[in-house]
Amino acid sequence: MNQKTDYLDPAKIMISVEEFDSLEGVHEFSAKYKERKEQMLRKYRKSVRRKMNGRRAGQCAAAAALLVLATGTIGVAANSEFFYRVWGTHGKEKIESHEEVLYDEEKGTYATVTYPQREYTDKNLDRAEELIGSSLSYGPVVREIGDTRLTILASVCDGNAAVVEFTLEREGGVTALRYSQLDNESKGAWFAEDAPFYFQFADCHENIFVDLERSAEDTLYCYDYMVVQQPDAQTAEYLTMEIYERGTGQEEWGEAESLQVPISSEAQQREYVSAEGGKITISPLSMKIDMGMVPGLTKEEAGDPWHAFYVSVNYKDGSNYLVHEHEIPGIHSCEVETDNASYALEDMENQLIFVFNRLNDPEQVESITVNETVYTAK
């Protein structure tokens, strides 16, 4: 399956995130310009993270790669730090909805873009060992890439999503990766245009969060949140990282070298269904929604994740996890737009997958709401 598009509204969020890269000034885009940008974005989203041989390493490589890294040595006895870094509040703070002025290099103009609210919580982390402990695989898996050392420390997979923790180290500073707080809030870290290498996970689509609190110039600590689309992900023993190094010419890339990252697809999953026959699969890590069976959507709308305007996991204790909410004029309104997913993607079969930004307990889920439809345990 190939990547289709991201769930965020291209006109409000992802246009700025993917296509603007500097600040200053304000520009009001016309409706026609926004429509063209949205069309370009969708084409771009379908092409990201494909094989890069023979292509420029510029923004294509930046978008195609998803880099990142992790912590010092993590052992079984130190799992709690891993859990709190990956799904908790360590290294993260609540992000209030805010505006940023971003530059469109192609048009030479500026736009004011609203970033959504994002919250983090330590809920369920005291039960992390019970929920996913047996699903964790530990390194270290080490690979020297030129003068940079890549160390994979831990990974976990549920068949639909995975999280990989690893570090990049280079004396004098890690220069291959570009990252910032705004990147953490949007598209994630990316490889520089002149980077001597890049890497990506085969059959996966990814977003890298760089832990700015722990990272230093010579060592980056990050977490790779990804949607897994390899056919045998439920039973696979590893994910394959493809590493590309620049050849003798600046426009040339060598053949991919493979690095196997151990995984175990044992994370608990439960199925929820709607009265109309729709299905959702949920685990501690992620949720997969069959958008083709969401009531009220045309076939075309079901293929566009923008029409999943409200997604909530509702717990037995009366609390809820608002995964995502945005406004659609005339259909749904909200006081503030929210994005509480580490990554999201809809595939060519209209399966929308959210990678959670917190640890979920499937046994405590009473129901799941998508737009106005309620799903209950099968």
Image (tube, rainbow, N blue to C red):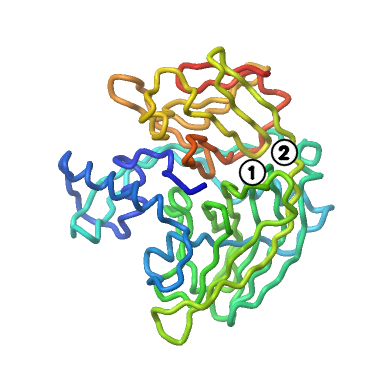
Vertical order, 272 against 69 (above or below): above
Q: Position of residue 318 (x, y in %)?
A: 63, 16
User: Residue, x 51% and y 35% (percent of image)?
Assistant: 352
Q: Are marks 1 and 2 in contact (CB under 8 Å)?
A: yes
| Nearer to us in this view, 55 or 107 | 55
Q: Position of residue 147 (x, y in %)?
A: 59, 82
Vertical order, 115 against 252 (above or below): above
- Image disc number at residue 87: 1
| Nearer to us in this view, 2 or 138 | 2
Mark 1: few/some/many CA within 10 Å (<14, 14-19, 20+): many
Separation of residues labelled 1 and 2 (CA atoms): 8 Å
When asked about the image quadrant of residue 315, the answer is top right
| Nearer to us in this view, 357 or 118 | 357
User: Residue, x 56% and y 72% (percent of image)?
Assistant: 256
* SS assignment at label 2: helix
12 to the left or right of 48: left
5 to the left or right of 343: left
When asked about the image quadrant of residue 117, the answer is top left
Residue ID for mark 2: 125
* SS assignment at label 1: loop
Quadrant containing the C terminus in the rendered view: top right
Q: Position of residue 137 (x, y in %)?
A: 77, 54
